[in-house]
Image (cartoon, rainbow, N blue to C red):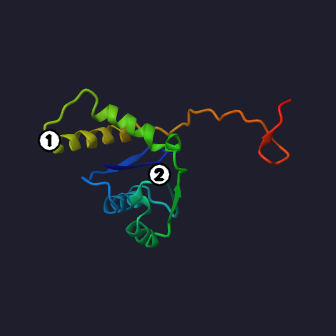
Amino acid sequence: MHGAFEPATGEATLVVSGKRDSASHIQLLEKVIHTFPAERLLVIEDNLSSHHSRDTRIALAAWPEIQILFLPKYACWLNLIEPWWKQLKSLALKGRKFETQTDLEAALWEGLAYWNQYRYPYRWKKKPQAQLPPWGGYGFCKST
């Protein structure tokens, strides 16, 4: 499963695929273009190999309106879609068992429809860490 989340409105979209490959990621990018129409799109991604693949880069060359910004490695807490995945799992999967993959996919689509019906803008809840101002510009901190 691949997903995209628009923090300003809370709207989300999915692509269901049995693989985590470049073709599935390109399908998601196509869906993002159609779901969130805009002159320019800033897509923030983690460093999954399919996000950097040759096929993905070729596809992105055809979509100049998409700009990709990669999160720093080992900074998953900055990925705004992670809290949304938690919400979707709770809406669609919590306390349920599925006999078939079709049932699972139907539950995910129902969860997505419910989310989009009652969506809200994402509010960042983490507080920035208090930092001391740099001393001398060399990365040293002078405590007062």
74 vs 92, nearest the viewer: 74
Residue 98, relative to residue 17: is it above or below? above
Q: CA distance from mark 1 to mark 2?
A: 30 Å
Count of numbered tags: 2
Q: Residue furthest top?
A: 95
What quarter of the picture does the C terminus occupy? top right
Q: Residues within 10 Å of mark 2 (few under 14, many from 20)?
A: some
Residue 123, relative to residue 66: is it above or below? above
The quarter of the picture where residue 123 lies is: top right
Position of residue 22 in the picture relative to residue 107 (left or right): right
Residue located beneath label 2 in the image: 46
The quarter of the picture where residue 105 lies is: top left
Place of residue 124 in the rendered image (x, y in percent of width and height, measured from the top left): 56, 37
Place of residue 109 in the rendered image (x, y in percent of width and height, measured from the top left): 27, 43
Three-letter code for the amino acid on which mark 2 is drawn: Asp
Residue 5, relative to residue 58: is it above or below? above
Question: Are circles 1 and 2 on residues that touch, CB within 8 Å?
Answer: no
Q: Residue at left 49%, top 44%?
A: 79
Residue located beneath label 1 in the image: 100
Q: Residues within 10 Å of mark 1 (few under 14, many from 20)?
A: few
- Mark 1 or mark 2: which is in front? 2
Kind of element beneath mark 1: loop
Three-letter code for the amino acid on which mark 1 is drawn: Thr
Q: Residue at left 71%, top 33%?
A: 130
Position of residue 93 in the picture relative to residue 123 (left or right): left
Place of residue 7 in the rendered image (x, y in percent of width and height, measured from the top left): 50, 45
Kind of element beneath mark 2: loop
Q: Residue at left 41%, top 58%?
A: 49
Position of residue 79 in the picture relative to residue 85 (left or right): right
Place of residue 133 in the rendered image (x, y in percent of width and height, measured from the top left): 79, 39
